[in-house]
Image (cartoon, rainbow, N blue to C red):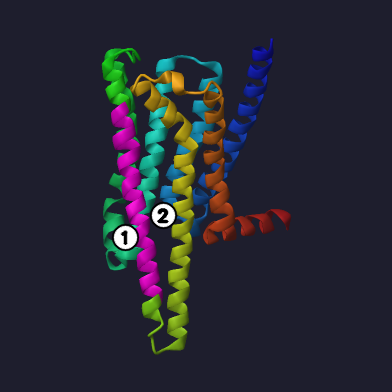
Amino acid sequence: MEKKTEGIYLTIILGALSVLIVLSNAVIVTLVCFNKTLRTYTNWLILSLAVSDLLTGSLLFPMTLFKPSYVVEGYFAAMILLSGVINISAVTCDRFIAIVKPLEYSYLVPKFFKRGIAIIWLVPAIYASVPLIWGADHSKTAHRVYLACLELLGVVVPYIFITAAYIQIFRQVRRSLALRKNLKSVSRQINERRRISADAKVAKIYCIVSLAFLFSWLPILYMTTAFIVKRIQVVPDILSSVSFFTIAAGSLANPLLYAFLKPDFKMALRNLYQKCSS
């Protein structure tokens, strides 16, 4: 009876979280689509990440609750995890070029942007389909190899790149701020320092988003690693339930970070509020 009651509570809470995730990320998608000032390359990547979070709330959680098929659930879990990591890698790459190689930004980003968006979604969709070759049978060695590759190539390697990129970004910001002190023109010095500080603030937001995403998926990654090495007994029973809430927290954190910390989104929301209240 207790398990049944716990299941009902879990269903209600996850259902409510799904609605919040969908609504908050839908706001981000709507703002970027309908506000011309937000239609930058960086914000289109944010929209792509918001779509990934939308899928978490609208597909992954409902499927977890109603369990249509472990094959379908596994497909969307892998696709959403991979698309999230690739989106975050793309945003990191965008900020890296903008801050470390600013003169190349206006050439490189427009040239590869559309292809980049296609890769962000095609790679996860194709890779998540691979288990269909062996019928997504979890007992097969091929499935363990598939999961190991997913963790290594889909999480570990991208996060090594993300970490290295942000170290380089913040070093460049510090170096640029030091150089701007030597500018003879006081007004130019102030303007340059403001621009660099703004870039640094945006980079910090994406760094927080990257860390939040990784920590939100850590329970799933831990359970997957235990399954790969055949040590599933080291996984606490409660961790499966906890993982739902950590993923939900990550998907909710992103739109809140943009809304309250990213200046252009704050301005757009303020203008929208003023229009609605007038």
Q: Report the front residue among 200 and 52.
A: 200
Residue 62: image quadrant is top right
Q: Estimate the spatial distance between the alpha carbons at disc 2 and disc 1, rounded to whole Å.
A: 11 Å
Residue at 57% over, 53% down:
259
Q: Report the front residue among 41 and 206.
A: 206
Q: Is residue 77 above or below residue 97?
A: above
Q: Secondary structure at mark 2?
A: helix
* Count of marks overlaid on the render: 2
Residue for badge 1 = 97
Which stretch appears magenta? 148-177
Q: Residues within 10 Å of mark 1 (few under 14, many from 20)?
A: some
Image position of 159 (left or right of 240): left
Residue for badge 2 = 42
Q: Is residue 95 visible?
A: no
Residue at 69% over, 53% down:
276
* Placement of the N terminus among the 4 image quadrants: top right
Q: Is residue 25 visible?
A: yes
